[in-house]
Image (spheres, helix red, strand yellow):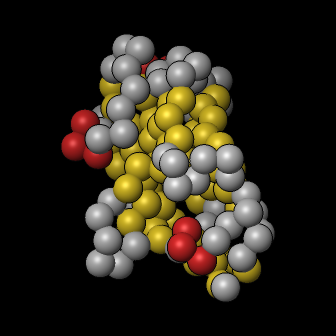
Amino acid sequence: QVQLVESGGGLVQAGDSLRLSCAASTRTFGGYAMAWFRQAPGEERECVAAVRDDGVATYTAVSVKGRFTMSKDNAKNMATLQMNSLKHEDTARYYCAARWDYRYLTDYSRQYDYWGQGTQVTVSS
């Protein structure tokens, strides 16, 4: 079992930046692939970024490419999502997710076993 706690959300203006953090309560964080998903009201959950267990391979959704960057620090048990040039359409609840796996990268939500409670990001236009 691993518990995930997100932080860093808030209300910002279009063009601003935010940094989301996901703290994981496990001593084997290095064995988990991590991802950030977001979900707006009435919309499906979307993977915006994912990173492999070793932090080397990454995935970034087309909708945020060039603006969002995900990283994974195995020494600190932390995954982060740096969000720059935020747009109104980035408004959503952002969730951190984890999957125990070796050298596997996926953006499919059903393949993630552990989820945080989420943090709200609201971008005013």
Q: Residue furthest left?
A: 110
In this rendering, the count of numbered labels is 0
| Position above or below: 107 against 33 | below
- For the residue pair 31 and 52, the one nearer the viewer reads as 52
Q: Position of residue 36 (x, y in %)?
A: 47, 48
Q: Quadrant of residue 108?
A: top left
Query: Residue sitting at 68 percent across and 47 percent down?
Result: 66
> In the rendered image, is residue 110 in sight?
yes
Query: Residue sitting at 53 percent across and 29 percent down?
Result: 58
Taking 64 as reference, is 85 left or right? right
Q: Position of residue 96 (x, y in %)?
A: 45, 49
Query: Residue sitting at 35 percent across and 49 percent down?
Result: 115
Q: Residue furthest top?
A: 102
Taking 59 as reference, is 108 left or right? left
| Position above or below: 18 against 76 | below
| Position above or below: 47 against 93 | above
Q: Position of residue 95 (x, y in %)?
A: 44, 56
Q: Position of residue 118 (x, y in %)?
A: 44, 62
Picture quarter with the C terminus: bottom right
Q: Quadrant of residue 101?
A: top left
Query: Residue sitting at 32 percent across and 71 percent down?
Result: 43
Taking 23 as reference, is 85 left or right? right
Q: Residue furthest right?
A: 16
Q: Quadrant of residue 33?
A: top left
> In the rendered image, is residue 24 in sight?
no
- For the residue pair 12 and 100, the one nearer the viewer reads as 12
Picture quarter with the N terminus: top left
Taking 54 as reference, is 31 left or right? left
Q: Residue furthest bottom?
A: 125
